[in-house]
Structure formats: C-alpha cells, structure tokens
Amino acid sequence: MMPAKKYALPAGLILLAFLFPLINGALGVNLMFPVIVVAVYVMLALGLNIVVGFAGLLDLGFVAFYALGAYVVGWFASTHFNEVSFSLFSALPTQGVSGRELPGIHVSFWLLLIGAGAFAALWGVIIGAPTLRLRGDYLAIVTLGFGEIIPRFFVNGDNIFGYNLTNGTIGIKGIDSPGFSFLPDSLRTWQQFGTLDLNPWYYTILVLVLVTIFVNIRLRDSRLGRAWIAVREDETAAAAMGVNTTTTKLWAYALGAVFGGLAGAFYGAFIKSIFPSSFSFNISVLVLCMVILGGMGNIYGVILGAILLQGINFYLLPQANEWVHAIGEALGSPLLASADLPKYNYFLFGILLVTMMLLRPEGIVPNRQRQEEFREEDEALVETVGG
Amino acid sequence: MAPTQEAKAKGTALLDSFKASSWQSRIAMAIVVALLLLLLVQAIKDPGQFVSQLLVGITNGAIIALIALGYTLVYGIVELINFAHGDNFMIGSFVGVTVLSGTFLGLGFFAPIGDESGAAMKIVGVLLALVVAMVLCGLINVGIERVAYKPLRNSPRLAVLITAIGMSFILQNLGLVWKGSSQISFPSLVSDSNALAGITDAISYRWKDIFVVLVTIPLLVGLSYFIQRTRQGKAMRAVAQDKEAAAMMGINVNRTISVAFLLGGILAGASGVMFGLFNGTTVFDLGFRQGLFAFTAAVLGGIGNLTGAVLGGILIGVIGAMNDQYIGVRWTDIVIFTVLILVLVFRPRGLLGDRSAVQGGGGQQ
C-alpha cells in the first residue's frame, strides 16, 4: 500500500510530462518553446541545488558552467573551426550540398553531452579547489569572480594572440542539431531535430531532467549526500567524524557543474547560436532565486521554484503587462496604458530574495533539516547576543 | 662595527624569512617582481606616458578607495559584504546628474548647470551635487541596513549576503527605471585641459585629476578625525572589537552600526558624483563592476582596515590604468577579478592585515 501511494504522485507527474506535447497540441496553447526553456532552468537549478542546498556552499558564478557547456557544443558542433574538417557520429550528412566536406568540427551531440558534463566538472574542480579553505562569504565572492571572468573571456576570446577562439560578442552561430541518423526515414524529425517540430527537443530535455532528478535523489540519500549535510551543518565536527571535507566539497562542485554543463550544452544546441551576453551574472542570481524560493536542499521545492520563477518571467509578466494596459485604457490612464512591467523584473527578484530571507529563509517547500538549521541558529545566537 | 653587525643580522633575518616562506608566496613574489620589471622597462621607454598613466590610475584609485571604505567600514563592524554598496554608488552618480540638471520629478528648481555656466555657478553646482548625493546615499544605506540587514543580524551569514544581493538588484532596477538603460552624460564642469601645460607637455595631469584629489583628501581627513577623535568614532572601534562587551559598556550597538552604514553611504555618494564628473558618463549597471573593483581593493588592503582600503583602492586604480595602457582595456576587468581571486585565495588577510575595522586604522594621514 505505502509504496504505491508514495510513487503515485511522481508517476502521475512523469506521465503528464510525457503526454504534454499531445495536450499542448490538443489545446493549441503553443507552449512548447517556453516549457523547454523552463526545463533547462530546472536542470540548472537542480545542479546549483547540489552546491548550495546540499553542501551549503554559496555559488554566485554558476552561470560559468552553463556557458562552458554551451561553448563546448558551439566549438565541436559548428563550422566555427573552419580551418579543419572533422566529423564524428554527427547527425549531419558528412558531405555538404556541394559534395565537399563540411568545414569545422562536427561531433555527435550525444557524445558532446558527455564531453560538456565532463568539461564543466573539470572546471568545477578547478574553481572549487582553491576556495576550499575560505569562509562562506569569501567563497561566494571567489565564485562570483570566476563567473564574471569566464563570460568576459568569451567576449575577448576572438583575439587570443591573434587566434579567434570564441568569436567575441558575435558569438558562435549555426550550431548543429542533434539527431539519430540511423533511424528510418519515417521518423524524419528524429533523424535530425528541426526547428518546426519541437517534440524531439522536448523529449530530450525531459529525459535529461528526469535523469538529473534521479541522480539528485540518489546523491541526496547516498553516503556522499550525508557527508554534504554534515559538512554544511558543522565542518569541524564532520572532519572529526572522519568525513574528508576536501573531497566532499569538490564532489559537490564537480557534480553541480555537470548539470550546469549539460543544461548549457542542450541550450546551445536548441537555440543554435550562443553569445557571451546570454551568460551574465543575472542568470546566476536568477537560478539562485529559484533554489532559494523553492527551498534549498529540497529537490521538489527547487523544481517548483524554477517553474514558478521562469513562468513569472516568461509568461506572467508579459501577460500582466497586457492586463495592466487594458485596465489603463479602460480607465483612460496613460500611465497604466503604457506601463512596461517586464522592465521591473529585477525588482521582483530583488524583493523576492529579501522577503524570502526575512520571512521564510527555508523556502516554499522546505527541506526539514535545512529549516531546523535556519531556526536553530537564530535561537542559539539570540540567546548569546541577547538582541 | 655595530652597524655592520646589525646589517648582517637583518640579512640573515631576511634569508630566514625567505626560507620560512611557502613555495606559493615565493612564486607570487617572483611574478610580482617580474611584472614590476616589465613596467619599469615601459617606464624607461616613455617616462611621460608612464607617469601620466600612473597619475590617472591614482585618480581612479581615489574614486575606488572611497567606495572601498564603505565596504570595509561595514565589514569591520558587522562582517557583512554589503553587496548593494556598488549600486548605492551608482545612485549617487544619478543623484549628482539630476541635481546638476536642476529638474526633479518634472519640477524645475533652477536652470541646468552646464558647460556654459559661470565659474562661480559651476563651483556651487558641483558642491551642491556632492552634498545632496552624499546625504541621500548615506540615508539610503542606513535605510537598507534597517530594512534588510538588521532583522537578520543573528541568522546564518549567507542569508544576509542573499538579501544584500536582493537589495543590489532593487537599486539597480531603480536606476534603470529612473534614467533608462543608456549611458547618461554628465555636464563637463571640470576642465579636462592639462594642469601642467605651462611646465611640461610630456606628462598630462588634468584639472579633473586635481579636482578628484582635492575632494578625496578632505573626506579622508574628516573620516580619520571622526573615527580617531570623536565619541561616536570611539564607539565604532569598540563595537568592531567586541560587540557584546561594547553593549555591556553602554554603547548603543544598533546606532553605531547605522553610523557605519551612514559613513559608507556618504563616501559612496561623493564617489559617485566624482566618477560622473571625471568620466563624463554614468549608467545604471555601473555599480556592479565598480563595486566589485572596490571590494577587490578592500580585500587587497585587508578588509576591515581603513588604511588598507585606501591603499588597495589606489593600487587597483593603478593596476587598471597600467593594464589599460600596456595590455588593453578589454582585459582590465579580467585582470582585476583575477587579482580579487588570487588575493582571496592566497592572502585573504590582505596586504596590511584585516585589523578589525577601525581599530587603530584611521585614514591614511
């Protein structure tokens, strides 16, 4: 009885997610594109949740891994390096229309996913290793520094001792679509994902998200997950009990970065062109907002937070804008009729961060352990300082 | 006899301290020395350009130092990275440009003070802009502390850092809504002709640079006097040392913290107006970059250490200016953020050590 009940809700939700394209088609609401973007952010938020929620290391530069993942796909699945010609299991036909070999490196997206995850993990360790000795807020600033340096490097990377590595602010365009070229022609849209039929994209990101959730749950309940909680609650005590705090923290950075890299790789292939300006500090804060809003350390809370915030950002704000305009026109108020609500979205994020921390630091769906930590420290310190 | 012996002792002490140093600090020293040598080569090649660039760096550094003092004052007392501080600086520059335009909320108070105004009018305008921006930024900083930081004083440190980021976003959006997303130009009230024109043409030291230094020095002297000589300054030093003990001695800790935020805000406001007048433009997201530079400066000097903040600010200004000249403007951000990371990782105490806030620090005088 109990297990059936326990799995009923997740199973129902997964089924719903798999049927979503049909529902979308039946209702004609045309939400495929925003839903795919939301799913990318769910992955990012789950990745950051490992670092911030599980291990308690505030990372303000998470966007760096997202950018690295995207650039891995940009480099190895486009015509960017056009001085060479190399193909590896690519979904593209090896020979171009004119019969000549395609310039640039074209590696299969599925291999690149692994590559992007590994590359991001490597950078997670590189960024994480020097910060291990630092206290919480210093650590946050170091990650912020890295998060700023990496996109700026991509901006300036069009001329590294004369070599064009990243194509600067113009970015990398025309990234290859993923696909399964061995499929029969009846499944044409799956042979090479197109821009008209978004179903293959949707199912790809859905599988990626489900894998992310599964890995997150398994990690949370693993020996490593318990070590993360121990380090988060009291590093000295954890070390005394035999937890290797160095490797524990490095694993948090590396695994968090993997999901950031995967999300970036998918996003790069999906959007087809990547620019350094799409990887700004604001994205780091947006993802952090999702984790905090939903509840640090709680996987379902974080998913909810990502869906809510991205929903507000993409759907509710433009929608509310139109409502306000309509009201303004009805009332004859030019101020309301010409209001520009999306302009205020940083206000929204700022106020959200402040009020969440003031009123409910544990998030909407709190992780019980985390909640007690927030409360406990309050009380203990109130006693010693006495207001 | 005696002096040579002393010198010998000094020599062995130096050798010992070198032997005791870690390989990391040896590498760091080697890199710093190499960079200084490269700079020296440039300096010998074209001394005029080098000195001009050095002077520009010091001016920029003075502006950064004023912001850095705000970070360091607050950190010394409540151990909080006031992330919204850089955006407060941006608001200061916006207030300055608004005051100079003479119009606020559609109400014209006086004719805009611009390039054509008389010399007396220009001086009055600059002073007015400085004072209004300082007062407003000080009050904004105190208000932020009351609303967003005070209720969380006993929470985990990360909670306060997150509200600080939230406040930073709110201020940034305020700037965006107030003045739009494009660059806003300042009237050029301070001449940018070379002050040394009659003496030498090789070195450029503009009136603008002199203006920044002339405004910065009294502020630093005033801050130093306040912290060293006044009752409230003494209270600040006490709270920085030990909050509980200070409270037991009858010091109003909450008021003292507010005063620290007020001082930080005042300096940020002055810095904002000077930045605008010096560079001619300002923009709503200026605070993020400039704030990070200033934070780097504060950490480089030793956070909590006022002298360190000024030294760090000037160093960062000079590093930025040298990089602009000899490596390329587009790499400056990366270089300075790298300095931030390297300092935090290898010497989190900074150059002068993080003496708790104000204790014995004072201005650089």
Image: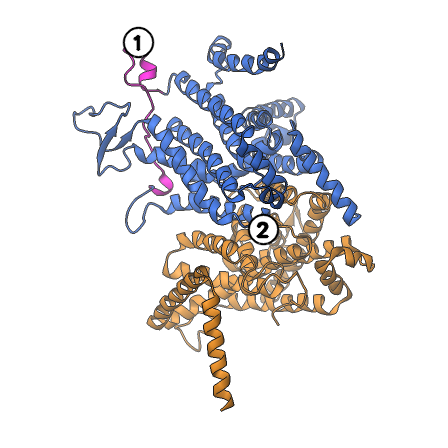
B191 horizontally vs B99: left or right: left
Range of magenta residues: A167-194
Q: Is residue A139 visible?
A: yes
Secondary-structure class at tag 1: helix
Q: Categorize mark 2 by other alpha carbons within 10 Å: few (<14), some (14-19), many (20+).
A: many
Circle 2 sits on which residue? B86
* Residue B214 falls in image quadrant: bottom right
- What x and y, as percent, mark residue A259? 46, 31
How far is mark 2 from mark 1, CA to CA?
58 Å
Q: Write the residue at 59% across / 11% down.
A: A4
- Give left or right: position of A384 versus B166: right
Label placed on residue B271: none
* Position of A254 relative to B279 (above/below): above
Q: In the rendered view, does A159 fall on the left or right side of A295?
A: left
Residue A206: percent from left, percent from top = 46, 20
Q: Amino acid at mark 2?
A: Gly
Chief secondary structure of the magenta span? loop
Frontmost of labels 2 and 1 is 1
Chain B visual colour: orange
**Residue A170 on the magenta span:** yes
Residue at the spot of label 1: A186
In the image, what residue type sits under mark 1? Answer: Ser
Relative depth, front residue between A254 and B36: A254
- Which colour represents chain A? blue
Q: Which corner quadrant of the image does residue B239 belong to?
A: bottom right
Q: The residue tagged with tag 2: helix, strand or loop?
A: helix
